[in-house]
Image (spheres, rainbow, N blue to C red):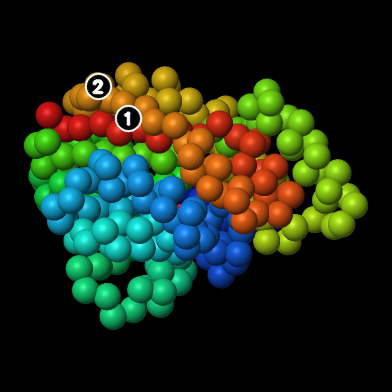
Amino acid sequence: MDGVNFDLKEEIRDYWSKRSETFDLAFGHRIAPGPEADAWQKPIRKALGPEPKRVLELACGTGEVTRLIHDLGHDVTALDFSEAMLKVARAKHAGKERLRFILADAENTLEPDASYDAIICRHLVWTLTRPEETFREWFRILKPGGLLLVFDGDWAGPKPTGRIASLLISWIDRLVGADKNYDGALSTRHARIMSALPFGQGLRPNMLLPLLRSAGFTDIALHSHAPIARAQRKNANLRNRLRTLVYRRFILACRRP
Ligand SMILES: C[S@@+](CC[C@H](N)C(=O)[O-])C[C@H]1O[C@@H](n2cnc3c(N)ncnc32)[C@H](O)[C@@H]1O
């Protein structure tokens, strides 16, 4: 059995490391150029403004969101604790200026106090093992006035209307065979990790509000993920179009005052 004597964090790291080579093949991970990239980039552009900023991207994975932030002209530090993920990201972005990759734990970055104008992460918060401490850590490394921008979702189960989409996907899987590249959100290992996580029963924005406030964040605002899902559907096949309907997703922004 995988990771049988690992602690939770090692288990998470090992899980993503094993998925690093195929991660970009899975729908929802790779960000296609064109309407989808534009839709992901829009809230980032809006949050960061036109002036170049010093941005820390946490859990950069294979560097898909990294590209969007960097293309906007910002100075990016992209962090992940999986060397395998970073290897893919480094190769993808070789030779770019204003971009550095670091191997570190997003829950304990070891970055200096007040050193970033913004922190951005996609699909990290649901997998935090110590969210309270982690938000305090992110607050610490942001400059006063600095921004935290979170893209995430509730992956513990389909939203009520998503159940139908989920059912249709399983019928398609039965008819044409399972999609090997899909991220195995239902795999045994993923489910075992989920069950041990603080947000393993689900992640809703309202669960984050008290934690963010107690870390000191203010100006908490929620934004809809719907424009991104609409853009993803534009060039997707039926199975992937249905996938955009299964889970609740959200964009959350807040500030260190
Ligand atoms: C679902 S992937 C998302 C990757 C990327 N953010 C994206 O959206 O394409 C989760 C990533 O989080 C990283 N990760 C999970 N927990 C982490 C932690 N505590 N510190 C650093 N990276 C972490 C994993 O290694 C993996 O690359």
> Which residue is drawn at the image coordinates 73% and 49% (left, top)?
239
Q: Residue furthest bottom?
A: 95
Q: Nearer the viewer, residue 80 or 245?
A: 245
Q: How crowded is mark 2: few (under 14 residues within 10 Å), some or many (20 or more)?
A: few
Would you say 103 lies left or right of 23 here?
left
Would you say 136 lies left or right of 130 here?
left
> Which residue is drawn at the image coordinates 41% and 53% (left, top)?
38
Residue 172 locus on image (x, y percent): 83, 48
Q: In terms of secondary structure, where does tag 1 sit?
A: helix
Would you say 253 lies left or right of 187 here?
left
In this view of the protein, can residue 87 be seen by the observer?
no
Disc 1 residue lies near ligand 1 with CB under 8 A = no
In this view of the protein, can residue 51 be seen by the observer?
yes
Q: Which of 44 and 35 is in front in this view?
A: 35
Would you say 185 lies left or right of 55 here?
right
Identify the residue position indicated by label 2 in the image.
Answer: 214
> Which residue is drawn at the image coordinates 41% and 69% (left, top)?
89
Q: Which amino acid does label 1 sit on?
A: Glu
Residue 126 locus on image (x, y percent): 47, 38
Q: Nearer the viewer, residue 204 or 214?
A: 204
Identify the residue position indicated by label 1 in the image.
Answer: 132
Give yes or no for contact between labels 1 and 2 (Cβ–Cβ under 8 Å).
yes
Q: In terms of secondary structure, where does tag 2 sit?
A: helix
The N terminus is located in which quarter? bottom right
Give the answer, above or below, for where 202 lies relative to 24. Answer: above
Disc number placed over residue 114 in the picture, else none: none
